[in-house]
Image (cartoon, grey):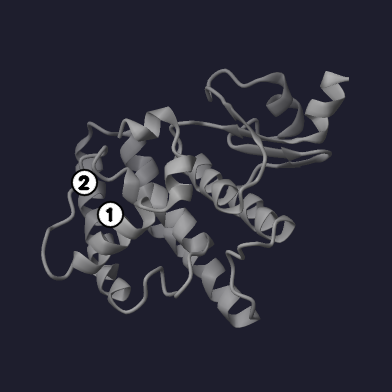
């Protein structure tokens, strides 16, 4: 009986150190979803993940008979499955722009972050740190007019960006403290002060 109950609930297999897992945990917390979060070592995956995910990767979201293994798909699924509060705009043009912002964050920020994490002591990582810092500094002014990323409301785009910003200090990336970056610094405070963000943090992330 216990096994059947467990299978019928939602389970999120999460890497507690990974910014991709973190973004989905933020969505789960924003939605107040009842979910079993299983913290998993990426080098020692449980049988469930190996059976359900053809790429044997983390994170993996299991909801009854559905298994998802791409984070943007997970986030949009959760937004549709639990519609309140909505984390994507209603109108098609605005939704498309949000999806494109998420794509740009992955191309411009996540790729650099992944490189830094995988090559932290290399000279190339120092270059990537500077490039990521410069990229974030260049977009800082957009937060002067709107409280969130090109939006009045907190969205999936913010869920993608927040885990990156939270890791900057841990990865020895220091944003310049000046008038240009103040809107970004204020935005970061708004993100990190959200109850859902605090709830989303793994023990590893809290220690950052």
Residue at point 45%, 74% (across, down): 151
Q: Which residue is mark 1?
A: 132
The image position of residue 52, as x and y in percent, is: 75, 32
The image position of residue 21, as x and y in percent, is: 52, 40
Return the mark for residue 173: 2
Q: Nearer the viewer, mark 1 or mark 2?
A: 2
Are the two marked residues, 1 and 2, in contact with CB atoms closer than 8 angstroms?
Answer: yes
Q: Earlier in the sequence, mark 1 or mark 2?
A: 1
Residue at point 48%, 65% (across, down): 154
Residue 165 placement, left or right of 19 = left
In front here: 17 or 197?
A: 197
In front here: 33 or 14?
A: 33
The image position of residue 88, as x and y in percent, is: 59, 68
In front here: 54 or 27?
A: 27
Asked if 195 appears above or below 147 in the picture, the reply is: above
Whether residue 193 is visible here, answered yes or no, is yes
State the SS at label 2.
Answer: loop
Residue at point 48%, 62% (across, down): 157
The image position of residue 71, as x and y in percent, is: 59, 48
Q: Quadrant of the N terminus?
A: top right
Whether residue 106 is visible here, answered yes or no, is no
In front here: 63 or 109?
A: 63
State the SS at label 1.
Answer: helix
Residue 5 placement, left or right of 126 = right
Q: Quadrant of the C terminus?
A: top left
Q: Label 1: few (<14), some or many (≥20) within 10 Å? A: many
Q: Quadrant of residue 72?
A: bottom right
Q: CA distance from mark 1 to mark 2?
A: 8 Å
Q: Label 2: few (<14), some or many (≥20) within 10 Å? A: some
Asked if 75 appears above or below 178 in the picture, the reply is: above
């Amino acid at each position: 009986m216990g096994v059947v109950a467990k299978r019928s609930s939602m389970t999120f297999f999460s890497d507690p150190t990974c910014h991709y897992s973190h973004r989905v945990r933020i969505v789960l917390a924003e939605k107040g979803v009842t979910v079993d979060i299983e913290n998993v070592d990426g080098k020692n995956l449980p049988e469930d993940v190996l059976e359900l995910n053809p790429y044997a990767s983390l994170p993996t979201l299991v909801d009854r008979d559905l298994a998802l293994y791409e984070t943007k798909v997970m986030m949009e699924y959760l937004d549709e499955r639990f519609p309140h509060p909505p984390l994507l705009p209603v109108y098609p043009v605005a939704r498309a722009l949000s999806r494109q912002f998420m794509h740009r964050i992955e191309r411009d920020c996540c790729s650099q972050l992944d490189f830094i994490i995988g090559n932290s002591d290399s000279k190339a990582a120092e270059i990537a740190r500077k490039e990521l810092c410069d990229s974030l500094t260049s977009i800082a002014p957009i937060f002067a007019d709107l409280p969130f990323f090109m939006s009045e409301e907190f969205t999936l785009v913010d869920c993608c960006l927040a885990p990156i910003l939270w890791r900057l200090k841990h990865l020895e990336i220091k944003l310049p403290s000046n008038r240009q970056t103040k809107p970004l610094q204020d935005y970061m405070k708004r993100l990190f002060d959200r109850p859902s963000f605090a709830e989303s943090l793994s023990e590893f992330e809290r220690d950052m």
